[in-house]
Amino acid sequence: MTSQQERTSPQVYPPPPDLAAHAVAQAELYERAGADRLAFWAEQARSLLTWETEPTQTLDWSGAPFARWFADGRLNVAVNCVDRHVEAGHGDRVAIHWEGEPGDRRTITYADLAREVKKAANALLSLGVQQGDRVALYLPMVPEAVVAMLACARIGAPHSVVFGGFSADALRSRVDDAQAVVVVTADGGYRRGAPSPLKANVDEALADRARGGGSVRKVLVVRRTGQDVAWHDERDVWWHDVVDAASEEHEAPALEAEHPLFVLYTSGTTGRPKGILHTSGGYLTQAAYTHRTVFDVRPESDVYWCAADVGWVTGHSYIVYGPLANGVTQVMYEGTPDTPTRERWWEVVERYGVTLLYTAPTTVRTFMKWGADLLEGHDLSSLRLLGSVGEPINPEAWTWYRTHVGSGRTPVVDTWWQTETGGIMISPLPGVTTTKPGSAQRALPGICTAVLDDTGVPVADGGTGYLVVTEPWPGMLRGIWGDADRYVETYWSRFPGRYFAGDGARLDEDGDVWLLGRVDDVMNVSGHRLSTAEIESALVSHPRVAEAAVVGASDDTTGQAVCAFVILRADDGSPPVGEEDTEALVAALRAHVGREIGPIAKPRQVLVVAELPKTRSGKIMRRLLRDVAEGRETGDVTTLADSSVMGSIRAGLGGSAADG
Ligand code: PRX
């Protein structure tokens, strides 16, 4: 893929001269960070954040790979994101221009936000939440999601945001793993014109205490859609009752820099999601620093829009913590880009004069598919910088983004990072870097990465290998919730002393990084991380499925698509599957995965097969299944226990597997 990328994109883009001359981040940043990395980070922490007690220590790596940053410092994250801007005289500055999918709008200033966060903090305390308790948030993209996260941060109760598109089962397992004491939710939210059943999912997740959810004492419910919801008087409370009635006075405690800020579950290579733990001072330092330098942020004039969901790490670091720590004005939009029309985004950009836009390649490819003429009637001249995140951006999409959204003049920054890294790690600096479409380019000042070969030796420029981070960084995860061993094993065992990200990468002749996608059993669908094992275990929990193998197949729009191969049970008493009921069964299995995990995990294709390709030791050879799913000739089959299996899979699929 890479050589082709480079062939099709000889064009490079130097920074616009006016941006380069006045950019927040200049080239000397690399030199300063290179000369003394820890002093550089200490300086960022001091200059970007307000500390109750300034840290004198920077990094404690004595417990490696468990890091402590700024450990003797004390601060309050919510105060840094809200109160201090009001105190500095910016209370009237808009923090959030919010737009609901049906077209309703709210304008929230920093002064408003400060008031709401304090009230919500008092409300959580009145519900019995104590410092250190976990609070699960299962919310649509409404301002209350930001308020609830900041209220948790304010009282030191780590939040665990569960994406609103996840199912009741997925919510229950996350609530259980973190032992959350309160769930904050809404009756529903709007997506593609329809209200989602959030409260109903919470009810289902908590219905049967024998199955889980037993830690939850209260459910705090935002009224968003007004739809009917079941009510449990002893457990459920309305946001508008308890938060609206709460006091506007709340004194924020000064918490230790290493106080847990949040847990965010993400898919790994096993069936069980991992609770990624982030703490306060280091995480906020990196979120603020990267947001400011990568987006060249001018809080007094920019209107920033990160079109992610707060349920993912991008929403945590680049809707809530980074932008608010930097005191910017931002747009928050509830719904999908095609509701009510496919011009919704460009209307939003025009209405608020958005200057900085951050989204995922899958969205850019969707806009490409819809056609550039949809943008033409709109004034997009306010845009001055575009960002990309979540998956490799192909040069065609990158170039289209710059040409049509950026009117051929804005820099595009492709930002590589992960839930685990907390903030951006590899990205151009818009005033410094000459960008190459499709490359994330260089580690940011203060971040040290390398690409290693199989034996752990750094590859030379032009080489391909595994992306690692070679030095600890402030926003790094502090562990996996409740599973220290898994943290060490997952990230630090493949290359001892190096953080292994799970991505393959190539260095080009200039040493710039080109991401090649995951090298493990993690898929990336529309920039969302999904585990093959998690979907396989959802499939085999269906009574008709004996065995399942899931692969991520290339998809023009979503990057990868979930493709499942299933073997049916012979012993369940059901009649053999004929042509006519395969379709119904496939639909049932897709729906089952949707229920077990969430609609985003539904396979694009489910292929019923008689056998799966396995090695002699019984490991499924996903590489071969990927060949089938992508309609390619099958690669090397010599390590298969039974080399005829691939032939029978293809024959059984009538040679048209890729069409599903
Ligand atoms: O494979 C990489 C891909 O997304 C993974 C991280 O997913 P998640 O933790 O959900 O965080 C997504 C948002 C930061 C990575 O291991 N990825 C993320 N950004 C890029 C990327 N792949 C290529 N280029 C990127 N810019």
Image: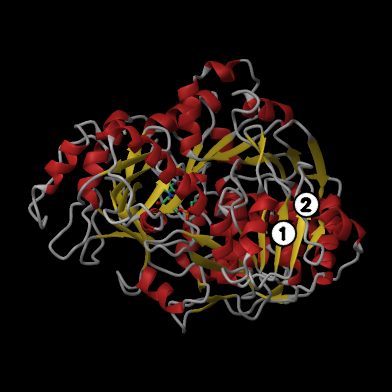
Rendered location of residue 612, percent (x, y): 21, 51
Rendered location of residue 134, percent (x, y): 66, 70
Q: Quadrant of residue 410?
A: top right
Please tell me which residue lies in front, 551 or 17: 551
Separation of marks 2 and 1 at Cα, in angstroms? 8 Å
Please tell me which residue lies in front, 537 or 157: 537
Quadrant the N terminus occupies: top left
Which residue bears the numbered disc 2? 222
Instruction: Tell me the amino acid under the disc marked 2.
Output: Val
Q: Is residue 400 left or right of residue 223?
A: left
Residue found 91% across the figure and 65% down from its top: 249
Instruction: Tell me the amino acid under the disc marked 1.
Output: Val
Q: Is residue 555 left or right of residue 275?
A: left
Please tell me which residue lies in front, 421 or 22: 421
Residue found 50% across the figure and 58% down from its top: 419
Please tell me which residue lies in front, 604 or 153: 604
Q: Is residue 68 left or right of residue 242?
A: left
| Residue 436 visible from this viewpoint | no
Tell me which numbered mark, 2 or 1, is placed earlier along the sequence: 1
Residue found 32% across the figure and 57% down from its top: 520
Rendered location of residue 253, percent (x, y): 78, 74
Q: Kindly state the secondary structure of the residue where label 1 is placed.
A: strand
Q: Kindly state the secondary structure of the residue where label 2 is placed.
A: strand
Q: Residue 304 got which mark?
A: none
Determine crowd level at label 1: few under 14, some 14-19, many 20+ residues with C-alpha closer than 10 A. many
Determine crowd level at label 2: few under 14, some 14-19, many 20+ residues with C-alpha closer than 10 A. many
Q: Is residue 374 above or below residue 100?
A: above
Which residue bears the numbered disc 1? 184
Does the residue at mark 2 contact the one at mark 1 (Cβ under 8 Å)?
Answer: yes
Q: Is residue 115 left or right of residue 639?
A: right
Rendered location of residue 578, percent (x, y): 28, 37
